[in-house]
Amino acid sequence: MALPRGRPVLGRAPKQDGVEAAEYTVWVTARQLTPIEGVDLSGVPTRRLPGPPPRPAPGWVVRPVPGHWGRTVVHDTTCRHAAGGGTELGTQEAVDALMQEGARACTDCDAAAVLVPALELGQGHG
């Protein structure tokens, strides 16, 4: 299908002399809004979008097994067995902790279901 000549095509503005002002609205997260050298962003209006608050990134806790020196269990941070101490870890650190001798993933929470397959994927690749 041929477009009629002399009419603008979608996405292209007709040629004009000079520059026209334009206003754009862009939604970004706080992490995406980075400083731009020489530009003051303090006057940029902001507002929270409706919806549920963002969920925190999944976290993990590694705890020693009482009475068993050198043995550890990795739990989801929401696991009832993770309460009362331990070391909080990110996902990669939790997978690394499971690679240690004497470590296992808790089967009462998501640790075994999430981390063990991730650990198995990494076998033989590094």
Image (tube, grey):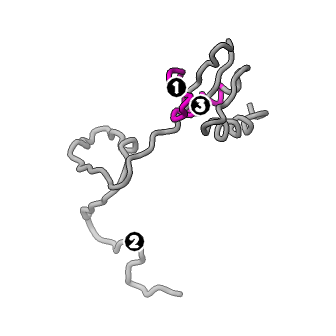
Label 3: state its secondary structure.
strand
- Please tell me which residue is depicted at 51% across the width and 35% down the height of the picture: 78
The mark lying in front, picked from 1 and 3, is 3
Whole-percent x and y of residue 37? 31, 38
Magenta residues, start to end: 76-97
Q: Residue furthest left?
A: 43
User: According to the image, label 2 marks what residue?
Assistant: 12
- Please tell me which residue is depicted at 73% across the width and 39% down the height of the picture: 121
Whole-percent x and y of residue 103? 69, 23
Q: Is residue 14 left or right of residue 61?
A: left
Q: Residues within 10 Å of mark 1 (few under 14, many from 20)?
A: some
Residue 19 appears in which quarter of the rendering?
A: bottom left
Among the two numbered marks 1 and 2 on one chain, the one whose residue lies closer to the N terminus: 2
Residue closest to the eye, 2 or 78: 78
Q: Is residue 113 magenta?
A: no
- Disc 1 residue type (three-letter): Glu
- Please tell me which residue is depicted at 29% across the width and 71% down the height of the picture: 16
Label 2: state its secondary structure.
loop
The mark lying in front, picked from 1 and 2, is 1
User: According to the image, label 1 marks what residue?
Assistant: 88
In the rendered image, the vertical position of residue 27 relative to residue 22, given as above or below: above
- Disc 2 residue type (three-letter): Arg
Residue closest to the eye, 78 or 15: 78
- Disc 3 residue type (three-letter): His
- Please tell me which residue is depicted at 62% across the width and 28% down the height of the picture: 74
Whole-percent x and y of residue 12? 40, 71
Residue closest to the eye, 115 or 86: 86
Among the two numbered marks 3 and 2 on one chain, the one whose residue lies closer to the N terminus: 2
Among the two numbered marks 1 and 3 on one chain, the one whose residue lies closer to the N terminus: 3
User: According to the image, label 3 marks what residue?
Assistant: 75
Label 1: state its secondary structure.
strand
- Label 1, label 3: how far apart the Cα atoms are: 9 Å
